[in-house]
Image: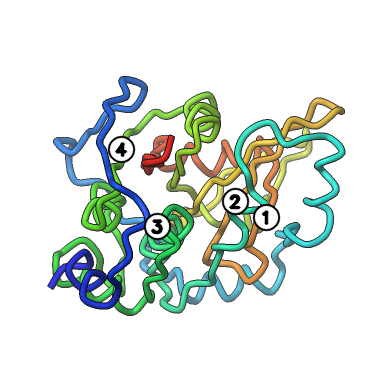
């Protein structure tokens, strides 16, 4: 049973009439070679590594305090305060991409799907492994199964994310969790490359500060402070580069 059928058997309401609209900005790339799984690192020990990172992590939750104050200086792209309502912390150690997709689905439709149901179906379909995570080429398949069109690419740019957010679309990116949860710097203040810990997060906003700095706002299911968490531009780009600037864009059917 796929998720679409399962949802239809539990609810008679349909919030949207899903209508595909071709957008040349986003290019589907399902013919690419097999790519690394999101939520794994080189020694397949993300679970232990995540726990170690969380102890000393500098990532702060901003959805209920400093983020709301940013409306004095409006957030240029996205609506991270609204999207923070749909954040949830993942239950499985490797389910970040699954949770990102069902959280986005809930934000677009109002329909809540449990992580266990989505993970079960995705595992049956070969899109997700509860130990190693979701291969990049399958990030978006849960959303597609639920009637939400997605556009997948490598070599995305910040401008790609900005455009997506500006029209109400919902980006998921693959990045190195080490480099956003506990960034390290050299003596010149440049981000240091760390061991890869593959992770998928939902980008909900991009904010340009008066001082010239840029914050990327995320719903990060892997961190207890991951709701509307702000990551510095340079840390984000350093982490995103490790996964070839991979992004899956969920098309908002209402825009």
The answer to whether one can see residue 214 in this image is yes
The residue positioned 22% from the left and 33% from the top of the image is: 29
The foreground one among 216 and 148 is 148
Q: Which callout, 4 or 1, points at the residue further toward the start of the chain?
A: 4
The answer to whether one can see residue 41 in this image is no
Q: Position of residue 32 (x, y in %)?
A: 18, 36
Q: Position of residue 10 (x, y in %)?
A: 27, 77
Residue picked out by circle 3? 105
Does 189 sit above or below residue 221? above
Residue picked out by circle 1? 229
The residue positioned 63% from the left and 71% from the top of the image is: 224
Are the two marked residues, 4 and 2, in contact with CB atoms closer than 8 angstroms? no
The foreground one among 251 and 43 is 251
Real-space Cα separation, disc 3 to disc 4, in angstroms:
16 Å
Q: How dense is the environment of label 2, judged by Cα within 10 Å: few (below 14), some, or many (20 and up)?
A: many
Does 108 sit above or below residue 24? below
Are the two marked residues, 1 and 3, in contact with CB atoms closer than 8 angstroms? no
Instruction: Say whether residue 80 is left or right of residue 40.
Output: right
The residue positioned 56% from the left and 64% from the top of the image is: 87
Which quarter of the figure has residue 223?
Answer: bottom right
Q: Which callout, 3 or 4, points at the residue further toward the start of the chain?
A: 3
Q: Give me the disc on residue 120.
A: none
Q: Which callout, 1 or 3, points at the residue further toward the start of the chain?
A: 3
């Amino acid at each position: 049973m796929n998720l679409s059928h399962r949802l239809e058997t539990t609810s008679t309401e349909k919030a949207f009439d899903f209508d595909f609209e071709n957008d040349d900005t986003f290019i589907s790339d399902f013919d690419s070679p097999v790519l690394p799984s999101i939520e794994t690192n080189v020694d397949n020990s993300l679970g232990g590594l995540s726990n170690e990172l969380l102890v000393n992590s500098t990532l702060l939750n901003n959805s209920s305090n400093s983020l709301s104050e940013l409306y004095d200086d409006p957030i240029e792209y996205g609506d991270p305060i609204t999207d923070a309502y749909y954040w949830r912390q993942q239950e499985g150690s490797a389910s970040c991409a699954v949770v990102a997709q069902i959280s986005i689905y809930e934000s677009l439709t109002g329909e809540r799907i449990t992580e266990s149901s989505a993970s079960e179906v995705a595992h049956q379909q070969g899109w997700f492994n509860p130990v190693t995570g979701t291969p990049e080429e399958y990030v978006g398949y849960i959303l597609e199964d639920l009637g939400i069109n997605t556009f997948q690419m490598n070599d995305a740019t910040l401008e790609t994310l900005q455009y997506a957010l500006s029209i109400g679309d919902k980006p998921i990116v693959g990045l190195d969790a080490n480099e956003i949860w506990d960034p390290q710097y050299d003596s010149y203040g440049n981000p240091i490359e760390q061991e890869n810990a593959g992770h998928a997060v939902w980008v909900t906003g991009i904010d340009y500060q008066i001082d010239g700095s840029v914050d990327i706002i995320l719903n990060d299911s892997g961190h207890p402070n991951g709701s509307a968490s702000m990551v510095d531009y340079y840390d984000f780009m350093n982490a995103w580069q490790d996964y070839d600037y991979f992004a899956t864009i969920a098309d908002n059917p209402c825009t």
